[in-house]
Structures are given as C-alpha cells and as structure tokens.
Image: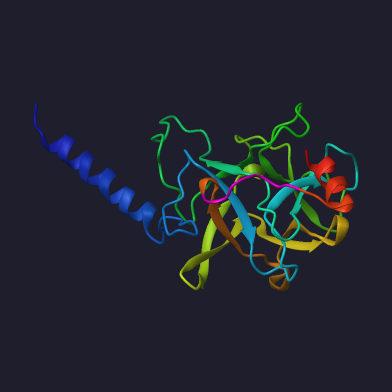
C-alpha cells in the first residue's frame, strides 16, 4: 500500500492544527505558570473598583438556589474553580493547558446547593430581564455553559484576562451587599477583567469573621 495517502492525511491534520491554534496562547496564572485543567484556581477581579476578593456563588433575586456569581469581600480569595473542555470524542490529556480564545467550561468546587451543578452558565430563563446573569446550574454539554478566556494585557508581570461567550462579554453590575455581580454584557464600561490564582498559592477558601461577612458566608456555603 502506498504511503502517499497517509502522508497527505498527516500533512492535512498538521495544517489544520496550525490554523486552529493561530491567535492562541497558554493562559497563565499569577505565578506565570500555565493554567491546567487538572488544577484548581481562584478567579480574582481586578477592575471592579471594590478592591474586593475572588468570585463566589451567591443567592440571586429569585431563589436561594438560583445562584449568581459575585465578588467576595476584600482579602477573601473566593471559592475555588476548575476549568475543563466541552466533551469531545477524544478526551484531553489530564494535564492539558488552557488556551486563550478556545471553548472552556468553569465549575465551582463547592457544596452549595448540592442538587444542582456548579458549572457556570449564562441564564437563559429571562427571569432577570434587565441583565443576563452569569450563574451556576449549567451543563458542560450546553452552549450557554461555554466561555472563552481572552488576554487583554498585563498588570506588572501578571497577565490580565476577560471572559467572553458567543453572545457577549462577562461584565459586572452592583449586586447583593454592595458587591459586583457577573452578567453578560455588550457594554464596554461594564466589562470586568480577571487574573487566576492557583489554589496552592493561597491558604484557604473564603472565610469570614464580622457579622455581615458571616451572613454572607452562610448564603455562599
């Protein structure tokens, strides 16, 4: 059997892979290391003006288990997340790196509301019509649970990113307890930027001491 068809197929696949990775690079955490699907991270907003902490699931307006995603208090790292790729016929390597401008899913590692998933999604219910909320309860197979990470610049030596979907960019509006709540927006002024902190670089998840913070923590956990 001639090797030409096999060589031709290999060249085609390599060219396809090259095209698919154009404009992509590895997402980096605050230590400059590649963000990988096998690890867990805290997502830290950097431009909300609240000088707050990382992201946490917090009760939205409709019910206690319709949880939006909001910013924790200052000094609190938030609730850890993991990244994964949408299901495919060929599963990724266990330590695969997350790349910019490619589809990912995001999942909180939390015991809150045990009967629903912790995957992020864009709310499709229309229950909060003034802004489309980013919330938990998603399905990693569904289009509205797919996000992309785009690099927007650097702060010091740390890469800064934004999250996008096929329908818009992740932004922030004032939410519960004067925090910033994530929404889908096409308003540049509301766009929110993030950095990723690997969990082993921070001691614990969100903690709380003041009465207001304890109330907030009960809502989260």
Res 156 seen here: yes
User: Principal SS element in the magenta part?
Assistant: loop
Q: Where residue 157 sits: x, y (%)?
A: 46, 70
Q: Quadrant of residue 120?
A: top right
Residue drawn at the location 68% of the way across and 67% of the way down: 191
How far across and down, in percent of the image, does residue 73 sit?
A: 76, 57
Q: Is residue 153 left or right of residue 75?
A: left
Query: Magenta stretch?
Result: 201-207
On the question of residue 126 being in view, the answer is no
Q: Position of residue 190 (x, y in %)?
A: 73, 68
Residue drawn 44% across the image and 29% down it: 89
Assess whether residue 202 is covered by the magenta stretch: yes
> In which quadrant of the rendered view does residue 23 lie?
bottom left
> Looking at the picture, does residue 3 appear above or below residue 11?
above
Quadrant for the N terminus in the image: top left
- Residue 57 vs 71, above or below: the answer is above
């Amino acid at each position: 059997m001639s090797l030409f068809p096999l060589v031709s197929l290999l060249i085609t696949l390599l060219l396809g892979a090259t095209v698919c990775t154009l404009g992509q690079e590895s997402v980096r955490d605050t230590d400059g290391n590649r963000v990988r699907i096998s690890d867990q991270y805290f997502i830290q907003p950097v431009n909300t003006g609240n000088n707050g902490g990382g992201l946490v699931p917090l009760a939205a307006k409709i019910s206690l288990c319709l949880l939006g995603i909001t910013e924790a208090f200052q000094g609190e790292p938030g609730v850890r997340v993991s990244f994964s790729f949408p299901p495919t016929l060929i599963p990724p390597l266990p330590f695969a790196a997350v790349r910019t401008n490619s589809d990912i899913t995001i999942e909180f590692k939390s015991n809150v509301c045990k009967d629903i998933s912790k995957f992020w999604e864009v709310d499709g219910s229309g229950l909060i019509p003034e802004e489309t909320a980013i919330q938990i309860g998603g399905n990693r197979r569904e289009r509205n649970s797919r996000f992309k990470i785009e690099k927007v610049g650097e702060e010091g030596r740390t890469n800064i990113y934004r999250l996008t979907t096929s329908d818009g960019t992740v932004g922030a509006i004032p939410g519960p307890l004067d925090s910033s709540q994530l929404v889908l927006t096409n308003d540049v002024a509301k766009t929110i930027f993030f950095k990723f902190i690997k969990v082993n670089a921070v001691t614990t998840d969100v903690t709380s001491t003041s009465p207001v913070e304890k109330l907030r923590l009960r809502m989260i956990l």
